[in-house]
């Protein structure tokens, strides 16, 4: 179960790091289309949030410093994916909505499992 959760965390982190970076530094050919669907400020906010969520899925688990941030990051991704699904459905973008629902399902599994089923234990304090 732990290995499965790590695989899901890594896949989510890769997806959100890539998408977040795309929102932060889009190719010139995409800027106009992005600005037509959302403001620049919101795009940058979303990009930063997605990159931080990707970090939050991995770093606390690896370092075991504040590992409770892992399910919190996954829960944050759930909120973003619910919003993204609604956004894509309203625009008639069914394939994008399906993708966001799949990411929502993965984030839900990670959030619940890392919170209740298989939480990551905190680091043991060093005794000097």
Image (cartoon, rainbow, N blue to C red):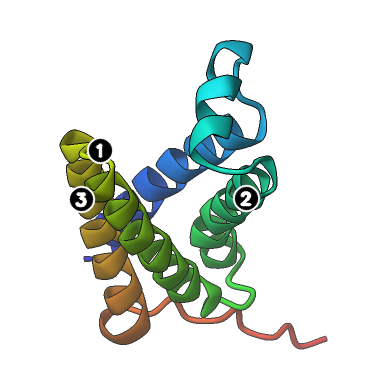
The image quarter in which residue 82 lies: bottom left
The secondary element bearing badge 3 is classed as helix
Residue 44 image point, x, y percent? 67, 44
Q: In 3D space, how far apart are the residues under numbered discs 3 and 1 (Cα atoms)?
A: 10 Å
**Circle 1 sits on which residue?**
96
The vertical placement of 34 against 81, above or below, is above
Q: Residue at x 47, y 81 (%)?
A: 121
Disc 3 and disc 1 in contact, CB within 8 angstroms: no
**Circle 3 sits on which residue?**
102
Marks 2 and 1, the one that precedes in the sequence: 2
The secondary element bearing badge 1 is classed as helix
Disc 3 and disc 2 in contact, CB within 8 angstroms: no
Q: Is residue 21 left or right of residue 108?
A: right
Q: In 3D space, how far apart are the residues under numbered discs 2 and 1 (Cα atoms)?
A: 19 Å
Q: Which quadrant holds the C terminus? A: bottom right
The secondary element bearing badge 2 is classed as helix
Q: How many marks?
A: 3
Q: In 3D space, how far apart are the residues under numbered discs 3 and 2 (Cα atoms)?
A: 23 Å
Point out which mark residue 63 bears.
Answer: none
Point out which mark residue 42 bears.
Answer: 2
Crowding near the residue tagged with mark 3, few <14, some 14–19, many ≥20 C-alpha atoms within 10 Å: few
Crowding near the residue tagged with mark 1, few <14, some 14–19, many ≥20 C-alpha atoms within 10 Å: some
Eye-nearest disc, 3 or 2? 2
Residue 87 image point, x, y percent? 34, 51
Q: Residue at x 69, y 86 (%)?
A: 125
Q: Nearer the viewer, residue 67 or 85?
A: 85
């Amino acid at each position: 179960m732990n290995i499965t959760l790590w695989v899901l965390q890594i896949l989510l982190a890769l997806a959100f790091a890539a998408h977040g970076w795309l929102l932060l530094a889009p190719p010139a050919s995409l800027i106009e289309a992005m600005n037509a669907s959302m403001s620049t400020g919101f795009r940058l906010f979303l990009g930063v949030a997605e990159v931080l969520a990707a970090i939050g899925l991995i770093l606390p688990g690896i370092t075991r410093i504040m590992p409770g941030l892992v399910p919190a990051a996954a829960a944050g991704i759930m909120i973003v994916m619910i919003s993204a699904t609604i956004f894509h459905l309203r625009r008639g973008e069914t394939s994008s909505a399906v993708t966001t629902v799949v990411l929502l399902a993965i984030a839900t599994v990670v959030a619940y499992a890392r919170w209740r089923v298989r939480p990551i234990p905190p680091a043991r304090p060093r005794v000097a």
